[in-house]
């Protein structure tokens, strides 16, 4: 089966130079197939988050290529690419406004104008799926707990129906209970909807899905473990 | 009553230094640490204005198009370095587009005022063109400094919000729209506020100068109205052009934010 996403010899350094310093990522390779659940581990500062940011073009590699459905990501319009490969940051970010304002925010962007915005009933049913049945769509999003915001951020991303979810330490700011909730949602999406997931973590998280793939980022390269 | 202009002698000019003395004493007594700056400012005011006075006398007599345009370029060139001094940004190259926008938009404004509103002939008549351009440059330079500085600082501060929007499918304009609007507004507000207070709270320098020089106040206010409108228009025009170019330069080819946190 062809790879849905592929990283070929990707090299990256933040200063963008070859001034004697080692690259953060050095000729890194990764193949991702539809429905994969990939966990990338590594020490803090080793470049795990950078891999995700490179995939959705928040950074550009110095060399190598990243292919989505066989096409270089550089040739795909960034806004289209990011609606298909969605990145959820470590710290959830909400804009001023209600929970509903935040959930509907992506539908105000031009690239998503063809997607129908979900109605109130759909949003409320999704809130329940994300263990957020206690919050209302009309309450201010900024006042939610970090755990609630993280689930809301994940829900907001999923409303766009992305093919690949990139999760940057999704539970690092959460208490244990919230972390379990977030991971159970992600695992359910992977198992039931065949959603492709790539998550980075420095915890010992082990996903409860049939065939997870684990990688370790070590010496600027990925090693399957 | 004297209807003509009253000349200020050098002795009278020296008397005006009493105001500087007041400022120096205030700074000294309250330990404001401004004595050095006040001294340098005083010396620069006197020397720069005397120099400009002699230069203008020469230029007005010479009545030469290229000399007039040369002075205009020197003024814009000086302004861009003042903007650079206020906006301490190294990651995004903004100087060249800002300079080119300043030259073209200020020229267009001064040209339009000279030819269409004042109706002076030739359009570059230095006695009209240079003061008009000078007012546009001075006012708009401050506005641009505020706009650009605000854009960079807000983009850095709200990096996480911008990236969140980008990751949800926003293009760079949508992701930075609010910051862009706030920055442009911040630059334009002083010019708009000036329109609110003019004639009530303060008499602008140009109008006061004309009245002091013996011009009929009813003529002076017409000039001032043109100036006020011109300043708002030129500020809006230059700010929008510069900010659109600078904002695009804050993002890479993948519409990724290039400004790194400080």
Image: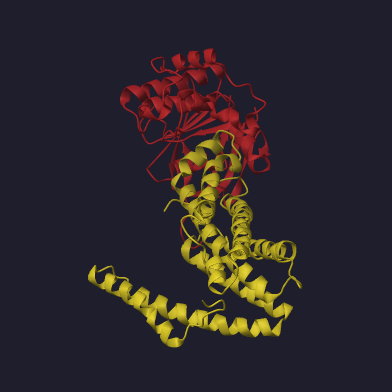
Q: Which chain is yellow?
A: B
Residue A99 at what x, y percent from top left?
46, 24
Image coordinates for residue A19, horizontal then vertical, percent: 49, 63
Chain A tint as drawn: red
Which residue: 59% across, 53% down? B243
Q: Is A176 placed above or below A62 here?
A: above
The image shows residue B248 at horizontal and vertical percentages of 61, 50
A136 lies left or right of B31 = right
Where is A219 relative to A118, above or below?
Answer: below
Q: Nearer the viewer, residue B182 or A84?
A: B182
The residue under the point 61% across, 53% down is B236
Whether residue B113 appears in this view of the structure is yes
Percent from the top left, x then y, of residue A134?
38, 15
Residue A209 seen: no
- In the rendered image, the residue lying farthest to the left is B29
Q: Is residue B226 left or right of residue B66?
A: left
Residue lying farthest right? Answer: B122
């Amino acid at each position: 089966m062809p790879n849905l996403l592929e990283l070929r010899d990707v090299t990256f350094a933040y200063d963008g130079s070859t001034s004697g310093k080692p690259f953060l990522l050095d000729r890194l390779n990764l193949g991702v197939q539809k429905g994969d659940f990939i966990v990338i581990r590594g020490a803090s500062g080793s470049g795990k988050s950078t891999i995700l940011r490179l995939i959705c073009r928040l950074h550009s590699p110095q060399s190598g290529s990243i292919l989505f459905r066989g096409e270089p990501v550089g040739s795909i319009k960034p806004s289209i690419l990011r609606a298909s490969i969605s990145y959820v940051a470590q710290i959830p970010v909400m804009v001023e406004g209600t929970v509903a304002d935040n959930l509907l925010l992506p539908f105000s962007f031009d690239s998503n104008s063809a997607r129908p915005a979900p109605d109130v009933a759909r949003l409320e049913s999704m809130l329940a799926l994300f263990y957020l049945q206690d919050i209302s769509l009309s309450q201010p999003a900024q006042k939610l707990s970090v755990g609630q915001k993280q689930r809301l951020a994940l829900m907001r991303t999923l409303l766009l129906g992305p093919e690949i979810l990139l999760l940057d330490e999704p539970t690092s700011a959460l208490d244990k209970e919230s972390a379990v909730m977030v991971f159970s949602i992600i695992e359910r999406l992977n198992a039931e909807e065949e959603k492709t997931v790539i998550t980075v973590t420095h915890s010992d998280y082990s996903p409860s899905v049939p065939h997870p793939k684990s990688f370790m980022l070590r010496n600027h390269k990925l090693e399957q473990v | 009553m004297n209807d003509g202009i009253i000349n200020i002698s050098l002795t009278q000019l020296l008397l005006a230094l009493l105001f500087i003395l007041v400022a120096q004493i205030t700074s000294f007594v309250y330990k404001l640490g401004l004595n050095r700056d006040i001294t340098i400012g005083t010396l620069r005011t006197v020397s720069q204005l005397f120099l400009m006075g002699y230069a203008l006398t020469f230029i007005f007599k010479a009545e030469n198009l290229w000399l007039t345009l040369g002075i205009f370029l020197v003024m814009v060139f000086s302004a861009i370095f003042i903007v650079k001094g206020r906006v301490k940004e190294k990651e995004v190259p903004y100087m060249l587009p800002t300079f080119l926008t300043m030259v073209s938009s200020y020229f267009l404004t001064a040209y339009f005022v000279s030819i269409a509103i004042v109706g002076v002939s030739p359009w570059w008549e230095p006695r009209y063109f240079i003061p008009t351009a000078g007012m546009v440059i001075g006012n708009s330079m401050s506005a641009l400094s505020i706009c650009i500085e605000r854009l960079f600082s807000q983009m850095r501060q709200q990096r996480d919000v911008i990236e969140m929007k980008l990751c949800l499918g926003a293009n760079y304009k949508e992701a930075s729209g609010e910051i862009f609007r706030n920055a442009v507004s911040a630059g334009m507000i002083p010019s708009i506020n000036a329109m609110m207070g003019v004639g009530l709270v303060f008499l602008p320098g140009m109008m006061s100068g004309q009245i002091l020089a013996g011009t009929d106040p009813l003529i002076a206010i017409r000039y001032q109205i043109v100036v006020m409108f011109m300043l708002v228009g030129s500020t809006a025009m230059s700010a929008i052009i510069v900010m659109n170019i600078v904002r695009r330069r804050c993002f890479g080819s993948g519409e990724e934010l290039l400004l790194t946190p400080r």
